[in-house]
Image (tube, rainbow, N blue to C red):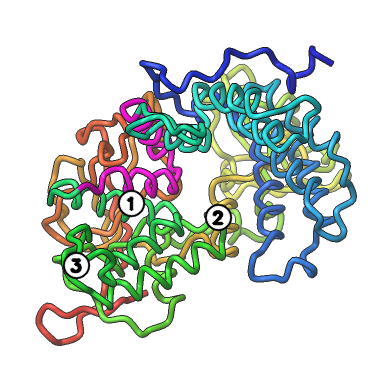
Amino acid sequence: MSDLPRYEKLPLFKPHRTTFTCVYQDQHVPPVDPQAEAWFQQALALDDPDIYSEKRDYPKMYQLYIQAADRGSWKAMLNLASLILSDYPGVPQHDPEVAIEWVEKAMRLGVPDAYDMMGTYHLNRLIKGGDATSAYALFQRAADMGSPSAQAFLGFKISGTYDSPDGEFWGNSAIGLQMMQCALAQGYGDAAYDLGALYKGTTPESKLRALKVLHEGVKLGSAKCAKDLASEFRGYDLTAGKNLIGHIDEARADRYYDLGTALEHYEGRLKLPNLDKVLPLPPAALPKWDGNTQTLIDAAKAVAPLPKVQQGATLQGREFIPHGYAVLSLDQSSTAVAGNQIVPRDGYWLAQYGAASADKSQLIPARRNMPERYQAGERFDASPFGWLTADQVQWHYLGEAYALPPQREDFLKHMIEVGQLREVPEPGTHIRCSGQQRCPQTGIWEGRVAGDHPLAVLYNRWNQQAFLEKGQAFPHAGERFIDVTISDVQWTYLGSPNAETGMSGILTIDL
């Protein structure tokens, strides 16, 4: 039993440690298999908070998680463990030992969040012999490996100014702050809530810093940050001089509260990167709002341009290839026959012209340069070039169409369908800017670093967007403690500005 990951021998928790190195989980977990990720996302969509839990398809959800986990998805392994430990009806398996084994499988893959989950199992005595001592050792290991949830939890626990006599918190604020900042850099929104509490202080500078970090937390899906800001804008602690704003702003408070309720409902899955489109920080003016919470959500969520029509989607007849399928390339073809012969095999063929000894890269298309599907026993169609006789055309076999793994467009389409993304028209003009420039056009912008950048996996998230007014500076990654320089980021304009009302300085939220 001692050889099992659940009993891994780890150094004891050190609340007064003097150093912490920020490590990002996404840089150290196993690579994502596209098909496994697609199954994981489908399972996640079935766990729809808008559907009563009794009516959700838990057997299908369980099966999809199993498929994804068996294909190496560590996220599916952890969600599967949680599902098994739940009391939801219809879940085929409720054996705690099976749940623990799935978490152990993720631990063997080196997944930081798996160590964090195992720590919770120890703390809740789900593991025989588990207790707070073993739990905190696992939390510490998870945080050092890069688990954002463990970093946020332990960071807050050690961020006190003194040691609690009952052992509930410790005085190591410098290291605690670093841990929470590392969690926020990874997009863990609730870390902003605890950071905001630490930043608040009493000076105008500390209050502004707290206000900004809480606002960032809302963008990252933290209901706690939204509810906290609603309270601040309603005047909490105003008479005591501790309020972050210094005045009451009921209009902003209402919007933060409504968004907080929605974020609570969606349990952190909903992200609102374009929050400034509907709720910019003062002194910016608020755009007019129709009072519908869904309007706030739709305008603040990430956007994706309408997907382009797939090249083969408009092709008919022999050239038609179903969406999501492909055939071999000419380079991969190992069979070729002359055009005056009978088609020897079912599948797609490509007509080319050139000397028999010529390299494939030197061949010339003899028809429309599109794969065409024939059945064995048919005759190949003639070349439209009258000077080419059938025996001069070489038909290269590209096989039957095969299913492609899910592509980026498939994931975007799924996220639009489940409400995580909003579809927008392709902008009329393509505008790209360096992060060093000022925003040239009001609307939503998407930030990206080069694919070979050391922090590309961390920075290039699907929700790395921002709503900006013309003339504003582009967001600096350092505001979320990501070590990416301004000059490394390229911003692309996605459109969706707010609409004019005909009254100077007054806009209305536009979708």
Disc number for residue 216: 1
Hey, which quadrant is residue 315 in on the image? bottom right
Toward which corner of the image does residue 179 lie, by quadrant? top left
Q: Is residue 162 visible?
A: yes
Q: Residue at x 12, y 51 (%)?
A: 204
Q: Is residue 88 above or below residue 482?
A: below
Instruction: Give the magenta-colored segment's residue range.
Output: 173-201
Kindly report the secondary structure that dominates the magenta region of the rendered protein.
Answer: helix
Image-based side of 296 in relation to 245, left or right: right
Where is residue 174? Give x, y as percent.
31, 27
Amino acid carrying label 2: it is Gln
Residue at (55% x, 29% y) in the render: 363
Check disc 3 and report the residue beneath it. 239
Closer to the camera: disc 3 or disc 2?
3
**Residue under label 2:** 310
- Among numbered discs 3 and 2, the one appearing first in the sequence: 3
Local crowd size for mark 3, using a 10 Å CA cut-off: few (<14), some (14–19), many (≥20): few
Where does the image place residue 220, in percent across and percent down from the top left?
A: 42, 51
Numbered disc 2: secondary structure: loop
How many labels were placed on the picture? 3
Q: Is residue 41 magenta?
A: no
Q: Quarter-wise, where is residue 18 in the image?
A: top left
Label 1 environment density (alpha carbons within 10 Å; few <14, some 14–19, many ≥20): many
For mark 1, give the secondary structure.
helix
Q: Is residue 2 above or below residue 320?
A: above
Name the N-terminal-most of marks 1 and 2: 1
Residue at x-position 66% and y-position 63%: 48
Q: Earlier in the sequence, mark 1 or mark 3?
A: 1
Q: Quadrant of the C terminus?
A: bottom left
Real-space CA distance between mark 1 and mark 2, rounded to the nearest whole angstrom: 36 Å
Q: Nearer the viewer, mark 1 or mark 3?
A: 3
Residue at disc 3, secondary structure = loop
